[in-house]
Image (cartoon, grey):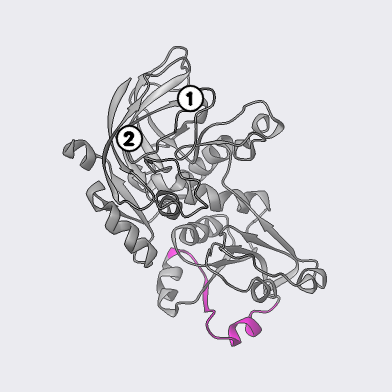
Amino acid sequence: MLNIPAYAAETGQSPLQPYTIERREPGPGEVLIDILYCGVCHSDIHQARDEWGGTGIFPMVPGHEIVGRIAQLGEGVERFAPGDAVGVGCFVDSCRVCPHCRGGEEQYCDEGMTATYNSRERGGGAPTHGGYSTRITVHQDYVLRIPESLPLDRAAPLLCAGITTYSPLKHYGVKAGDRVAVVGLGGLGHMAVKLAAAMGAEVTVLSTSESKREAALQLGARDFAATRDPATFKELANRFDFIVDTVSGEHDYNAYLSLLTVDGTMILLGIPEAPAPVAAGMLIMRRRKLVGSLIGGIRETQEMLDFCAAHGVASDIELIDIADINEAYERMIAGDVRYRFVIDMASLEAAA
């Protein structure tokens, strides 16, 4: 076993602090990755603070937006070579035999995917630990190749925020000329704008904050509307073919559904704490659809990375040292980041 420097939450009430974890030497089909960068997802906060119904496994090392280079190969690895730039996203294993796994949608595994952290390994049941660490061992089937043209630090959030927005855009058939509204301009929202624009869609950002207008247009949106003004919903009624809703806070789904045209689709990516009422008439009268989407499978995530490389799309980030992670959590809660924190893991290597 390898002793690996990391940052962990000892309990749901404690701050993240230096910690040492064990990683196995790579076995058959596995690779050992030197982690260079790890993105900070809002779900890291929820899980490290045990805010999802007491499901946390502690001590917990968060992080599922991992980019690094191959350090060592296990027996039989043919897809990668030492030094290759690679990524690891939200899961590191699945049952591999159910229809969803065989169809390349491991995120919907019938037995449940094995999350990169706050989960348990198949077979042995040891807790999984994420990317707030200097190395990770993963089976090659769950490792992504990072295209050469993508900056490694800005590629890290693509492994979660990127695929979470790319997957529904592709699945529901967004194409050039479609009118797409993006609700919220945070870590997910800014990627939805970039990706939809790269697909040729006409993007409008819907935000409660008028101050985000200029940023939305710089990211590739053609229009912006402030939703605190009730007149906005009248002016934009029946306008959009698709709405990508990235907001996890409580908001009125019916108001946004009214902005869809006939056969329009509203895609939910955020999960508000309280269930939201939906008026049947909002769906029935214009044959609208209200749907949800998770992340993507390995095959689709690789497709997304290649798409981003071909279209010059990457996440807008603020690079931080690992010692600043607790402050970064507070800033994320306050919305004080444009648009994703990424940890430079060299700062942990140096501290160790």
Q: Nearer the viewer, residue 56 or 220?
A: 56
Residue at point 25% right, 47% down? 322
In-front residue for pair 264/114: 114
Inspect the image, locate mark 2, and give the three-letter code of the amino acid beneath it. Answer: Ile
Is residue 222 part of the magenta span, yes or no?
Answer: yes
- Residue kind at label 1, given as amino acid type: Gln
Task: Determine the residue located farthest toward the left in the rendered image.
Answer: 351
Please report the residue visible at 26 percent of the width from the left and 52 percent of the height from the top. Answer: 320
Q: Tell me, for residue 140, which label it has, or none.
A: 1
Q: Which residues are magenta?
A: 219-237
For the residue labelled by badge 1, is the local secondary structure a helix, a strand or a loop? Answer: helix
The foreground one among 207 and 117 is 117
| Residue 205 image position (x, y, % from top left) | 52, 70
Residue indicated by mark 2: 35
Asked if residue 118 can be seen in this view, the reply is yes
Q: Count up the numbered dots.
A: 2
